[in-house]
Image: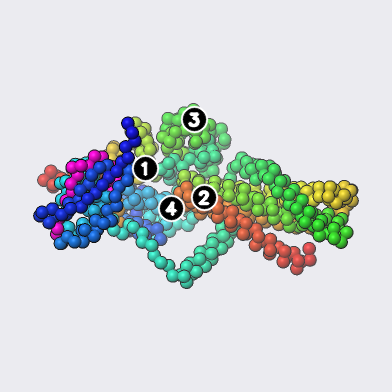
Amino acid sequence: MSQNPASVPEVTVRNLTMAYGDFVLQRNLSFQINRGDIFVVMGGSGCGKSTLMRHLIGLNDPVEGEILYGDESFTRAEPERRERMLRGVGVLYQSGALWSSMTLAENVGLVLGEFTDLGPDEIRDVASLKLALVGLKGFEDFYPSEISGGMQKRAGLARAMSLDPKMLFIDEPSAGLDPISSRLLDDLILELRDSLGTTVVVVTHELASIFAIGNNSVFLDAESRTMIAQGPPTELRDHSDNPKVRSFLHRGEHQVMGSENG
Amino acid sequence: MTAVESIGTAAIEHRQDGALVIRLAGSWQLRGSRPSLAGLERELDTLPPLGTVAFDTSELTEWDSGLLTAVAMVFESCTRRRLNVDRSGLPEGVRRLLALAEAVPEKTDARTSEMEVPFLNRVGSIYLSAYDSVSEMLAFMGAVTLVFGKFLAGKARYRKSDLLLLVQQAGLEALAIVAIVSFLMGLILAFVGAIQLQAFGATIYVADLVGIAMVRDMGALMTGIIMAGRTGAAYAAQLGSMKVTQEIDALATSGVSPMEFLVLPRVIALVLMMPLLTVYADFVGILGGAVVGLTMLDLSPLTYYQQTVNALSFGALAGGVFKGSVYGALVAVSGCMRGMQSGRSASSVGDAATSAVVTGIVAIIAACGLFSVVFYILGF
């Protein structure tokens, strides 16, 4: 594996088991997300990708195993400590999840007001800047219901970036977006990583996106209920010894690529 | 062109080589009439194992899913009986579609089987869920109390503008419905009382009856029930749909507590507005009683007023107002709790609203009974 010796672990998952009641969704997940990675969580529908993200940001608690932020346990942290750890984290939800009773500027500005000493005017300026970054300059006073789904998603990204997080979690960035918007979002994610050094965790099954941005990944399988591959997506596509992974990454088009192609 | 009725027919015959031939003719469409293939099952039973079933569709004119479903059923019956199916007689399109339907094998454990749950089992699980529901309510009330403590210490995070809007929705906008219901309530109380009291020639006591009933209990009770249906349901629906759109998750991961940001202002709004609405309902109810007193019983306005004022005490009014704010808290807590517990689908938001109203009304009635006993013992 292309393990960079200088890589610093941002999130470490150890032997994680996720379940809803008696139903085990995934078990024995162990992987590491390094600083500056664009880490892709992939797999077929219903394999637990989004649930894994919910675990990583503390919305669900693991049945077994542990999640570490840096070298500190996130799973075992006290609620106050956890909240503090999450302050370095931005989340973009699948449908944007903008707060519908607030304008876009208020959406972006809410956490700024909570966790910084900025005055109302400064908050507004920062919010405008973040909205401009995602191409929504001039939409400050719009309500989420007044803009399109793609714009809501971009506004959600602006909100996720409001505190300049070290880490960004993104659930299905391209779901419901047209190809161009989806490509623009990918470019934005790359730009964030390159300019701010943000670590990005992306949950997706969109192949174009996976190859365009991902430099590391984990593949969850619904049938065996565990991870069956990890590593850079392009490497998995060309060299994975698991036919399921290769088939997924080729859209099922090259059913069998013998190792002689290798 | 006359309306052609679409009719499909099926006939079964045995071929020389022992194969069973199903002859499908006419138009096999979902909208038309198609014969049932039930008789076919018996014919299939007569075939020896590994016998062959073939199709003849040379006289078939039109077909759609009606034919596909029937043929698929035949395939299944044949597979069960280990018969061979000769598909060559079927139209090309039918063969291709059926091949597509068979491409992925049936997931065997996916179909939920209806299980007969024993009676005692059901009683047990109903008891357990009622028990859980009470402990959930207590836990939620505890959480609300903690947040309330933070609010009193001035450390709670919520938006003033949200609170003002909620106060307006729970207070000002409820005036009309509260007025209508309490006015009629007073009217009915007076009317029922008047008929009984007329027998004793004591009609003047209608004023006492209406005044005391409204101020002590009915004003707060009716307002509480109205608010459960009006505002409690609204809270559950608002929070439930925020759950569906992940807005509540987004608050939590942003480090803003949904309890402070969403639940607290709603509880405060109702707890603040309910006492005012209760006083208002008391007043309008007494007015309703006065209408009966003045028109039906020919009492003079001054006498009625004097009689009412003498019947009421400050203690009764304060008790009623206190009850009102407790009912308000109960309605707000059950509305918010059901909303926060809502699942992530449209129907679960509806369920949340329904159960918010039920929980709210049950809680109000239970509290009302408790108050009656406690106030009696305290000698109010």
Q: Which residue is mark 3?
A: A139
* Tag in front: 1 or 4: 1
Q: Which residue is mark 2?
A: B350
Where residue A144 appears, x then y in whole percent?
A: 49, 36
- Secondary element at tag 4: loop
| Front in this rendered view, residue A107 or B222 | B222
Q: Which residue is mark 1?
A: A172
Asked whether residue B204 is drawn in magenta, I would say no
Quarter containing the N terminus of chain B: top left
Asked whether residue B54 is drawn in magenta, I would say yes
Residue type of the residue flagged with mark 1: Glu
At a point 73% along the width and 57% down the height, the residue shown is B217
Residue type of the residue flagged with mark 4: Gly
Per the rendered image, the range of residues in magenta is B50-69
Where residue B74 appears, x then y in whole percent?
A: 24, 53
Where residue B43 appears, x then y in whole percent?
A: 21, 58
Residue type of the residue flagged with mark 2: Gly
Asked if labels 4 and 1 touch by Cβ distance under 8 angstroms, the answer is no
* Tag in front: 4 or 2: 2
Q: Please state the chain letter of the residue tagged with numbered disc 3 in the rendered image.
A: A
Mark with earlier residue (1, 4)? 4
User: Marks 4 and 2, how far apart in space?
Assistant: 27 Å
Mark with earlier residue (3, 4)? 4
Mark with earlier residue (3, 1)? 3
- Total marks in image: 4
User: Marks 3 and 2, how far apart in space?
Assistant: 33 Å
Q: Please state the chain letter of the residue tagged with numbered disc 4 in the rendered image.
A: A
Q: Is residue B292 left or right of residue A176?
A: right
Q: Which residue is mark 4?
A: A58
User: Marks 2 and 1, how far apart in space?
Assistant: 27 Å
- Secondary element at tag 1: loop
